[in-house]
């Protein structure tokens, strides 16, 4: 939904070259290079750095700076030649420049009224709203011992009946990779396990173990239920980025709704209008459903 906040380095450099140096030369924005009489300021280099190809963004800092500067130098060189040819006076260039200007105005407005306008209180309030809309799921904490045959599972149950510690038996008998943890599976909801396993585990009382082997595609299980609870919601600090995105999205959609109401949108091509309206309806529908924050164990 959200558009890029930065122009491509080439387009940015071309605009700067056409209008000449636009940044004041001072201590906060020094000149880092010159191409003929054209100056490249630190602020331009910063913009070029921010718009580097993601692959180049993985380079060490000095190599990234060099790559960004190289791109700016290339832009300045060809932009000067383009200006000498009068490319800036062509209708095609003027249209492209107008589009790029509108896009950057959109992005600056978006940053001011959406990104920078989000407050901690808004994020907290949205988090509480989302959490309040979640119906807590039941989850259990269990251990299991996995063996290959029903006879082995029955033998394990006999040892448990005789008072053998479950975790100790898991370390000795289980074939599951978590055997070293005593068969500990942690907390899980029904959907996270195969049906046969979940049905048996959720039917147990706290502290009880299955008295008959539980068969699944993995083998035969003996399950110990250690706890039952309603799944707690994720803490705010764990999901804050996702919640902030929801707040930003709502602010953005509100800005667009007000702008459309004031200006109106008219589309002359019937087919294009239909596609546009359908796309906006789908977007609005997606904005009103499925927003609840999902927790992670």
Image (tube, helix red, strand yellow):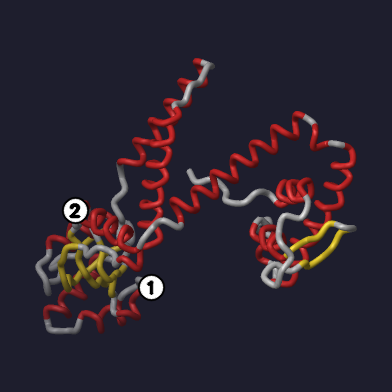
Residue 216 showing in the rendered view: no
- In depth, the one of 224 and 233 nearer the eye is 233
- In depth, the one of 136 and 48 nearer the eye is 48
In the picture, the disc for residue 4 is: none
Residue 97 showing in the rendered view: yes
In the rendered image, residue 139, in percent from the top left (x then y), is placed at 20, 62
Q: Quadrant of residue 68?
A: bottom right
Contact (CB < 8 A) between labels 2 and 1? no
In the picture, the disc for residue 135 is: 2
At 17% from the left and 73% from the top, the residue drawn is 226
User: Which residue lies most toward the left here?
Assistant: 205
Looking at the image, residue 206 sits to the left or right of residue 73; the answer is: left
At 82% from the left and 53% from the top, the residue drawn is 76
In the rendered image, residue 157, in percent from the top left (x then y), is placed at 17, 74
Q: Is residue 114 above or below residue 41?
A: above
At 34% from the left and 63% from the top, the residue drawn is 120
At 24% from the left and 59% from the top, the residue drawn is 128
Secondary element at tag 2: loop
Q: Which residue is mark 1?
A: 177
Q: Is residue 106 above or below residue 93?
A: below
Q: Quadrant of residue 170?
A: bottom left
Looking at the image, residue 267 sits to the left or right of residue 97; the answer is: left
């Amino acid at each position: 939904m959200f558009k890029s906040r930065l122009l491509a380095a080439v387009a940015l450099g071309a605009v700067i070259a056409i209008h000449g140096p636009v940044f004041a030369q001072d201590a906060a924005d020094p000149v880092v290079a010159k191409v003929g009489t054209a100056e490249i300021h630190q602020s331009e280099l910063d913009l070029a750095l921010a718009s580097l190809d993601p692959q180049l963004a993985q380079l060490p800092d000095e190599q990234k700076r060099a790559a960004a500067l190289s791109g700016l130098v290339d832009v300045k060189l060809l932009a000067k030649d383009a200006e000498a040819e009068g490319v800036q006076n062509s209708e095609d260039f003027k249209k492209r420049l107008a589009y790029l200007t509108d896009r950057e105005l959109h992005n600056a407005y978006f940053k001011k009224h959406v990104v920078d306008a989000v407050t901690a209180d808004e994020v907290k309030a949205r988090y509480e709203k989302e959490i309040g809309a979640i119906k807590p799921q039941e989850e259990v904490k269990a251990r299991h011992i996995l063996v290959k045959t029903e006879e082995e599972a029955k033998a394990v149950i006999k040892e448990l009946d005789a008072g053998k510690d479950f975790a100790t038996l898991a370390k000795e008998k289980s074939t599951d990779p978590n055997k070293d943890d005593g068969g500990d599976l942690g907390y899980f909801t029904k959907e996270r396990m195969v049906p046969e396993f979940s049905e048996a585990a959720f039917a147990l009382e706290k502290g009880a173990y299955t008295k008959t082997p539980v068969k699944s595609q993995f083998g035969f299980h003996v399950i110990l239920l250690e706890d039952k609870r309603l799944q707690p919601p994720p803490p705010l600090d764990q999901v804050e980025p996702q919640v902030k995105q929801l707040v930003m999205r709502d602010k953005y959609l509100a800005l667009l709704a007000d702008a459309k109401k004031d200006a109106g949108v008219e589309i002359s091509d019937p087919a294009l209008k239909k596609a546009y309206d359908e796309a906006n309806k789908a977007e609005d529908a997606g904005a009103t459903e499925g927003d609840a924050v999902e927790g992670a164990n």
